[in-house]
Image (spheres, rainbow, N blue to C red):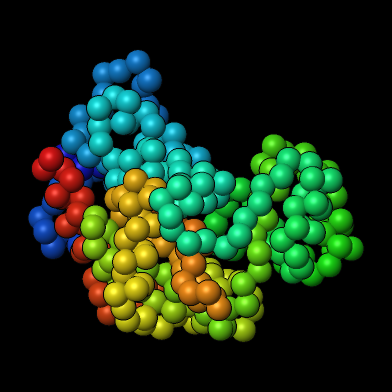
Amino acid sequence: MRLGVLLSQVRLDEKLLFTALERRGVEWVRLDDREVHFSLTGPPPELDLVLIRSVSESRALYAAQILNALGVPTVNAAAVIATCNDKVACTAALTAAGVPSPATRVAFTPESALLAIEELGYPVVLKPVVGSWGRLLAKLNDREAAEAVLEHKAVLGSYQHSIFYLQEYIAKPGRDIRVVVIGDEPVAAMYRNSQHWITNAARGAHCTNCPITAEIGDLALRAAQAVGGGAVAVDLIESPRGLLVTEVNATMEFKSLTEASGIDVAGRLVDYVLEVGKK
């Protein structure tokens, strides 16, 4: 199989992947998204499959769209990346599939956003429609804070800052849960523990192993299937009304999960890529 790996930089995650590929004797080509270019009018690149590992969400999406249109499959598929990259699309897909999520509102003006916030009740979490690593999240505790943050967002000017994605605040027990689903199997999970209300590993959360119970595994798999399947990371929070899904990530980091769980996530991902390449 002629495998391409599209990446932005070589992090520990990619080093784990390279080791897993070498152990399986897989020949692969490095595609640096800072250097590679694609022809929209063909012919397609001489590759059987491309594993998408770009840090940039936009580069990951456009590369996958181009490759899929040219007949080259990707992990993940462009449709999955598009859904996961957009929080509105992701929440809509989860809701359509009956997957429980926090109460969410979307507004297009600061005025309508304030109405939505009042409807949800304080505190409310304001998230960017596109983004990761827990960046640009804001917990709005009262109307004064909401008015200030909404004004700042409006002045920033980009269309993404003019889409107001609002969720009810869930008082988590000092942690959330990340589950990696590969194909049809939840393969590993971890608690991300933090005294801060944002519990991303990228923000310094302490990661520990989380046993995959029947409830956790079933919900994570349902969430993965709702966005189109593939190899994804599903974020869960424990709430008074049970587990809720907050996000699904299409280009996951797994170094912390590997350390916390002791599971060779990179190896499982490579095995899945090889299975997809045979189809």
> Residue 134 is drawn in which quadrant?
bottom right
Total labels: the figure holds: 0
The quarter of the picture where the N terminus appears is top left
Q: Between residues 18 and 108, which one lies in front from this camera angle?
A: 108
Residue drawn at x 38%, y 20% is 40
Please give left or right for residue 89 compared with residue 78 in the image. right
> Residue 166 is drawn in which quadrant?
bottom right
Q: Is residue 174 above or below residue 6?
A: below
Q: Between residues 87 and 39, which one lies in front from this camera angle?
A: 87
> Residue 36 is drawn in which quadrant?
top left
Q: Between residues 144 and 208, which one lies in front from this camera angle?
A: 144
Residue drawn at x 39%, y 57% is 223
Q: Is residue 7 above or below residue 99?
A: above
Please give left or right for residue 253 compared with residue 278 in the image. right
Q: Which residue is farthest top?
A: 41
Residue 176 visible here: no
Where does residue 17 sit, x and y in percent of width and height?
A: 27, 60
Residue drawn at x 51%, y 47% is 92
Where does residue 221 sit, x and y in percent of width and height?
A: 32, 61
Q: Between residues 107 and 74, which one lies in front from this camera angle?
A: 107
Where does residue 268 sit, x and y in percent of width and height?
A: 21, 63
Q: Is residue 154 above or below residue 134?
A: above
Residue drawn at x 46%, y 72% is 243
Residue 37 visible here: yes
The quarter of the picture where the C terminus appears is top left
Please give left or right for residue 126 compared with residue 173 in the image. right
Q: Is residue 246 above or below residue 28?
A: below
Where does residue 75 sit, x and y in percent of width and height?
A: 29, 46
